[in-house]
Amino acid sequence: MAKPRVLVTRRWPAAVEARLNDLFEVQLNRDDKPMQPEEFRAAMGQYDAILPTVTDKLGTPSMEIERPQTRIFANYGVGFSHIDVERASGHGIVVTNTPDVLSECTADLAMTLMLMVARRAGEGERELRAGEWTGWRPTHLVGTKVSGKTLGIIGYGRIGQEMARRAHHGFGMKILAYNRSPVAPEVLAQNKATQIASIDELLPECDFISLHCPGGAANRHLINARRLGLMRPDAYLINTARGEVIDESALAQALWYETIGGAALDVFDGEPTINPDLKQSERLVMLPHLGSATREAREAMGFRVIDNLEDFFAGREPRDRVN
Ligand code: 8YV
């Protein structure tokens, strides 16, 4: 039987590409650039599977095609708000993602951001590299203590829980959790977390707020000017979820007028373009979407995609089907 034809849109870890080549007839997008809608439309006429990443916008323009050859989008990543899943379902295309395998690394990065912004690590490094450090003094780059503070987690799924585990068990933080659906008491008990009924009630109680909810239209600007106004003036906002969850213009204002303590972002609305207003503030830490960027997570994500493809082409239900 002919091997399924698979399009890999970006370069993946070598070990994963080697395994894909063993199993499938693989086409690699060799220039490693995000694919454009017209390229997707052409690809959907040729390949049995497309393996997109967050940089591939699989919305309406990419899917304007009748009777595609493609039967599965096996996404490399847990978040899939770049894929119009409803439209894919309309074409009979199965969509899968890669949960679990990047939860720890993404939570590690959220901790990194929290510590960096609270302890002014980015400012300190910039000063040192610029040759502007004049030496130790009691009032120099004084930040905020993290240990023992209250952390609010919005989206208490796999990554949110990993963040809570690190913060509670490692840093003695008190955990407040907002989640759309009720969280089982035994899950909350693992990190002595308290579920709060609404985001509006959660925000004023927290020293740090970390976002771990999905992106997409439903959560667009979940953190808007009004909600930023509910944060304490010395509280910090951390985002490793998706850029669109925050109204970035409102955040830029809150930072500029110092109505919040600071923010640390790994994801941006319209990334890799950054809203220039954000860059005005020294109290903002920015990283270039590094959440899952470890050798371990990126390999595990690739092998998880392969598991989903093997199941699908063997006629089994892929474990990570989302539609
Ligand atoms: C991925 C991510 O690396 O998995 C996710 O949802 O945000 C990232 O860490 C990226 O999305 C790859 O597609």
Image (spheres, helix red, strand yellow):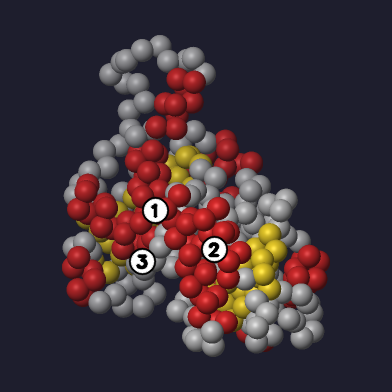
Point out residue 160 in the picture as x, y percentages from the top left corner. Answer: 35, 62
Query: Mark 1 sits on what residue?
Result: 105
SS at mark 2 in the image? helix
Mark 2–mark 3 distance (CA, rounded to whole Å): 27 Å
* Badge 2 amino acid: Arg
Point out residue 320 in the picture as x, y percentages from the top left corner. Answer: 47, 76
Point out residue 241 in the picture as x, y percentages from the top left corner. Answer: 47, 59
Pointers 1 and 2 in contact (C-beta within 8 Å): no
Task: Give the mark nearest the N terminus, 1 or 2.
Answer: 2
| CB at disc 1 and ligand 1 closer than 8 Å | no
Residue at x-position 36% and y-position 50%: 108
Instruction: Kindly report which numbered mark, 2 or 3, lies closer to the viewer in this rendering.
Output: 2
Query: Mark 3 sits on what residue?
Result: 158
Q: Is residue 139 left or right of residue 225?
A: left
Q: Given the current orientation, which residue lies at the most extreme front position?
A: 1
* Badge 1 amino acid: Cys
Q: Is residue 255 left or right of residue 165?
A: right
Residue 285: tell me if it is visible. Answer: yes
SS at mark 1 in the image? helix
Task: Give the mark nearest the N terminus, 3 or 1.
Answer: 1
Query: Mark 2 sits on what residue?
Result: 19
Q: What is the quadrant of residue 297 in the picture?
A: bottom left
Judging depth in this view, the residue of 267 and 75 nearest the camera is 75
Task: Give the mark nearest the N terminus, 2 or 3.
Answer: 2
| Quadrant where the N terminus is found in the figure | bottom right
Mark 3–mark 1 distance (CA, rounded to whole Å): 12 Å
Q: What is the quadrant of residue 100 in the picture?
A: bottom left
Alpha-carbon neighbours of circle 3 within 10 Å: few (<14), some, or many (≥20)? some
Point out residue 75 in the picture as x, y percentages from the top left corner. Answer: 57, 68
Which disc number belongs to residue 29? Answer: none
Q: What is the quadrant of residue 60 in the picture?
A: bottom right
Residue 98: tell me if it is visible. Answer: no
